[in-house]
Amino acid sequence: IEREMSPSTVIRVSYSASNSHYLPTGIGRGIWSGQINPEYMALGGLLTSAATPANIALAQAINPAITGLPYANFAGAIGQMLLPFPQYSGIGDNGDIGNGNYNSLQVSAQRHFSRGLQFLISYTLSREMDDAGSNLGGFFGAGGRTAYNNKLEKAVGTQDIPQQLVLSYVYQLPAGKGHYLGGNSKLADAVIGHWQFSGIQSYIQGTPIGSNGGDNIGANCTVPYAGGCYADYTPGFSGSPKINGSYGSGGNPLHTPYINAAAFANPAPYTFGDTPRTLAYRLRNTSGFNENFSIMRDIKLYESISLHVAFDAFNAFNRTQ
């Protein structure tokens, strides 16, 4: 939707979306991943015990579907015995089974040069969801919890930026010939006339923090012959999961912790963790702020020769992220 607010100013409102399928993942597809079916996690410590007749009987008491040795001369652990392809020490399947979608509301206001001013202001409100893990961020091979239920991986994507504001502008300073400031003085026109001030400012909200070790939070887990695990929420935890103030406000960021480790716990053995893949406690990485400014003018030396003078300031306020 586009609306002309004046002969030089236009406002646009847009909805933009995309839907993607068959994206690469490191999760795998069911039995083709070579992972054990998660229903066998109920066997607990038996998974790493030798597949002796006594241990197989104990396993069958827990899960009657277990039939016994996969072949006559099998020698290994119960967990190896229950793999879909127990004759191999391991197989891999990076199945292209990922899905993703992006939805956004985009608003912009644009003004063409009028009374010395030109600008473009853009704001985007969006959300990106996927079940492909960090692969969409360019890190191939990141695995999920289990190859038997990829739906567990569906979450806000690791590159999701929900809000973004960008301002760019050029302003012809009202000084020199034809302007009220110094317009009647040739000297003033030569010194302060014809200058332009411009800037590009961007402000973006931080990306989600994961709880599977891909970002700041990881977990030690015991899930033999399976994929991996995420952290658990700590039972009874209250208060803010952030400590030491806002990100970047407490000394050396390499040594100052900003996330309270007590908010998370290692999952119980043979479980996969109960936090989502991203946004546990709504935690996000630091937001991004950047301001670039420039002031410039062209000084005509001869009919066909001009001198361009400019002063630029990049990241003018020394923002850190």
Image: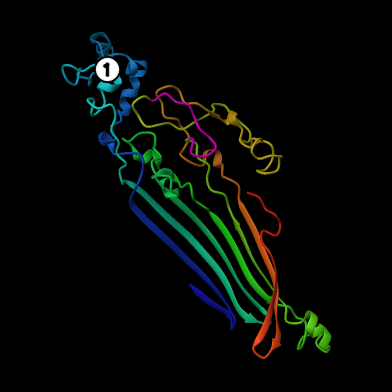
Lateral position of residue 193 relative to residue 163, left or right:
right
Q: Residue furthest top?
A: 54
Q: Nearer the viewer, residue 8 or 236?
A: 8
> Which residue sits at x=42%, y=60%?
17
Residue position marked by numbered label 1 in the rendering: 76
Instruction: Provide the residue span drawn in magenta.
Output: 213-223
Q: Nearer the viewer, residue 91 or 249?
A: 91
- Residue 113: percent from the left, percent from the top? 63, 81
Rendered view: 32 above or below 187? above
- Residue 218: percent from the left, percent from the top? 50, 32
> Which residue sits at x=53%, y=48%?
207
Picture quadrant of residue 119:
bottom right
Residue 288 in view of the camera: yes
Q: Determine if the magenta segment contains residue 248.
A: no
Q: Residue furthest left?
A: 72
Q: Nearer the viewer, residue 92 or 201?
A: 92
Mark 1: amino acid? Gly
What is the chief secondary structure element of the magenta stretch?
loop
